[in-house]
Amino acid sequence: MQQQAAPDATIYDVDVLTQKEYQAQQAERLMQDVFSGEENAEKTGNLITRFVASYEKHKHDMPLDQWLMQEFRQYPTIWTDEAELASTAREIILTVENNNAAKTSLHEHLEKGKSRESWLAKRIEEGASAASVTNVGAYAGNIETALSNANEGMAKTLFTKHGTINRGPNLDGFIAEQHHADTFNIDAVAKGSEYRAKVLVPEGKAYAKNSMDIGIYDKNGKLVRRYQSKYGQDAESTGKLFEKGDYRGQRKLGPKGHGYEERIEIDGVNSKPLTKEQAKAVQKKAQLEAEIKQYDWNDASRIEIAKNIGKQALIGAAFAAGMQGTRIMGRRIWNNIAGKQNPPASDDLKEFFESSLKSTAHISIQVAVSGAVVVAAKSGWFGALMKNSPAGRIVIATYVAMENAKILYKLAKGEINAVEALDAMGCTTISTVGSLVGAAEGAVIGATLGVALGPVGIVVGGLVGSIVGSMAGNFVGNLIYKDGKRIVKTACNTIKHFVNAIKNKINTTNHKVNSMEFFV
């Protein structure tokens, strides 16, 4: 393993994250890491402006689905056939409608004096029933784990100790190590074994030279087996990595098919082999806690589980709110577009931002923006994961982005304070979760939340929110940008508590919290 400093909770220091220099650096890193440069980000912004202008031109003479398919036909190379084009259009519209319906349902529930936890618990029960799931607790546990892993991916993987984007080229190697430890522990639990595997994660310092990557420990905590893991592009590359160090006393673990040990094992307990290609894709899966935790679903625990999910939703909202770099990036892209085209303000987007936080009267403009983002994603402008993601996942990221941008606008106008704004963002995430389970998404809930609310979803969402805010007029755009800074302090305090909880969890349990399943 290459030496790399372990993440440090001090990277979430409010004084650091609110500095203009840090935020500018963050914006530049985000531009490079997600969009591979300013060109793709600007192409995305241009596409959103074109879709919105086209929708406003045709909204009175063409049904929404027909208009969207007409727009999609202008990009023939991204569709397999007409059937895929049509089904994607339907999926976008249905996803936006479902999200708004869930939002309405949540607010009606809250207006009756009931809690959002009881609303979420009911939605989970309905989703489990629709998906023919008998263990509702395990079903809810999968949702909590998906959100937790997305958040932990942000906290432990997205940032280096300097607060910048982790651009390590060998990140899949860390993913592989976690995969082997996780699947070994799952197998151990299933077989009643007391052995447990741990990935070496030094606290606050660099990895020691030639140190082991994975250890297997007995019930007394004694180290009984050591592994060194190398994941090269091919067998020859993996061999060369092993040649660079002195790994005597350690077993050599490599990708399946590379000629080295393909799993960690002891006394009949094994991890699952992993190919190099699978290591690149394993971030989509949430394995550890959903398998090991026991979730009981009864009157006493159902609300507690819903509270845990709500807590994870609030943390995710805090990450989105704290990423001022995404708003700087979006504002810069919009200034480039406006300088070249001087596009007129969008009346529909202005109405969207001026409407109440409870309003669901702007589905069509949400569909228009979502359609543009789906085309951008399928064109590869956001990287491989978003390119291959189902449209619904991209739409959810867009929907959350637009709702959060509206919340920032209300904050800037003084209609709500920073704590209320962050809580409203948490409500957006909760209603989105409720929409997913209500639609009986079942097994894909984890992957959907990972993409939409994980690192890439948050970055893309920040760009989209800034673009649509600016399209509503300079007054709206300026307020979103300027008061986005104000919520950073509130968000950072929430994140800081979360990071401290992660450190305590590392020190007191065998569960590893540096899961990378949702990192891109």
Image (cartoon, rainbow, N blue to C red):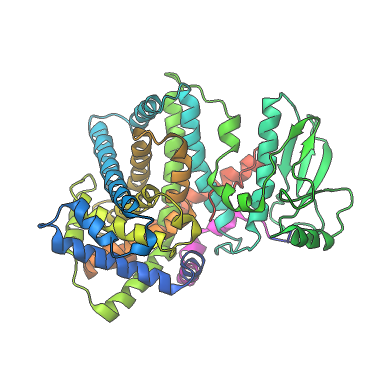
Q: Residue at x 26, y 30 (%)?
A: 113
Specify whether 87 is left or right of 212.
Answer: left
Q: As rendered, which of 122 and 56 lies closer to the eye? A: 56
Left or right, 268 with respect to 170, comes to right
Find residue 257 and report its horizontal and vertical position in percent. Answer: 73, 50
Say if the magenta span includes residue 247. no
The answer to whether residue 40 is above or below residue 514 is below
Residue 122 visible: yes
Q: Is residue 398 above or below residue 53?
A: above
Q: What x and y, as percent, mark residue 325?
A: 44, 65
Magenta segment boundaries in residue numbering: 5-27
Q: Quadrant of the N terminus?
A: bottom right
Lateral position of residue 520 relative to residue 323, left or right: right
Q: Is residue 262 above or below residue 22?
A: above
Residue at the spot x=48%, y=36% of the render?
Answer: 144
Residue 25 highlighted magenta (yes or no): yes
